[in-house]
Image: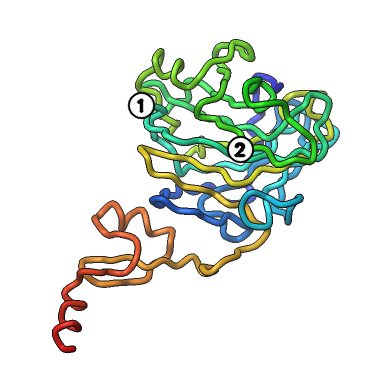
Amino acid sequence: MKKRRLLTGVAVTVAALAAAGIAAAATLIVSPGHLDGWSVVHDTCGAATTGSVAFVKGPGSPPAGKGSVEFTIGSNGDSYETLRTAGFDTVKLSDLTALDYWTYVSQGGTGGQAAYIDLYVDWNGDNVRDDILTFEPVYQTTQGAVVLNTWQNWDALGGLWWSDVSGGPPPLFTLATYIASHPNTTILGGGEASFILASGCGGSAWTNFVGNADKLTVGVSGVNTTFNFEPKKRGPNPDHKVKVCHKGHTITIDEHALPAHLKHGDHIGPCTNSKALKKKKKKR
């Protein structure tokens, strides 16, 4: 379990908070120096934090790639160690069509804990935080218990959550139930980085916790983005470049610029029906 958050406001941002647009149907590698809009933030619900966040190899065989993000709490179980993004700010809860991730716990404190999700939410679009919704694996009785030294997948979209405003946990509820009561709820905007992978903030239940998270998938209106956390940039795209078809011409852009291009009608991949290609075919 974790406490209601009476945060001190002394968070230390390791990487500058930045609103990152989310690419369509993509897998993004998040690693030190290539955080793609994610930020490591150290906070506390009590005394000074004794925790840390690191991108590491393993443990074991992660569900995506060779690494993961690791949360360490230390002696102060009220340490609130987080990885946050503003990339989903202003997304309506009712537009979420997928939300799942994987955890691994090598040292579970005393409460059977695992890394969890916090969502700062806004009920009426005024960019003021009205509630904090929390999905914790420890309360997912229908998805199985948290097991040590094992990668486990958690369905947050269909799972049980609790509300800070309601004083939980309990009561526990589904997102569908919450949306029925608050139909206009969005993930809080204003660049606060309101989508959070978190650990700690629960007193002795979290003391000396060590656990990891990986392969976070978020679907918005049927378009999924998967985040693969790695200790270093891997794969065929180490420079974060992507080819798009822009006004009939294939160009290469930084993947951070991809959302703006998609918004204006470009599509991922080389042009296949451009005038240039037609001209080439005529010459043959």
Q: Residue 106: where, in percent of width, then height?
A: 81, 40
Q: Residue 1: where, in percent of width, then height?
A: 71, 21
Q: Is residue 148 left or right of residue 87?
A: right
| Residue occupying the point 20% across, 71% down | 274
Q: Give the residue at mark 1.
A: 125
Q: Give the residue at mark 2.
A: 197
Q: Which comes sooner in the sequence, label 1 or label 2?
A: 1
Quadrant hosting residue 103: top right
* CB-based contact (under 8 Å), mark 1 and mark 2: no
Instruction: Between residue 25 and residue 198, name the one nearer to us.
Output: 25
Q: Is residue 101 left or right of residue 270?
A: right
- Amino acid carrying label 2: it is Leu
| Residue occupying the point 24% across, 56% down | 265
| Residue occupying the point 21% across, 77% down | 277
Q: Secondary structure at mark 2?
A: strand
Q: Is residue 46 above or below residue 271?
A: above
Q: Secondary structure at mark 1?
A: loop
Q: Residue 88: where, in percent of width, then height?
A: 44, 40
Quadrant hosting residue 34: bottom right
**Crowd around label 2: few <14 · some 14–19 · many ≥20 (10 Å):** many
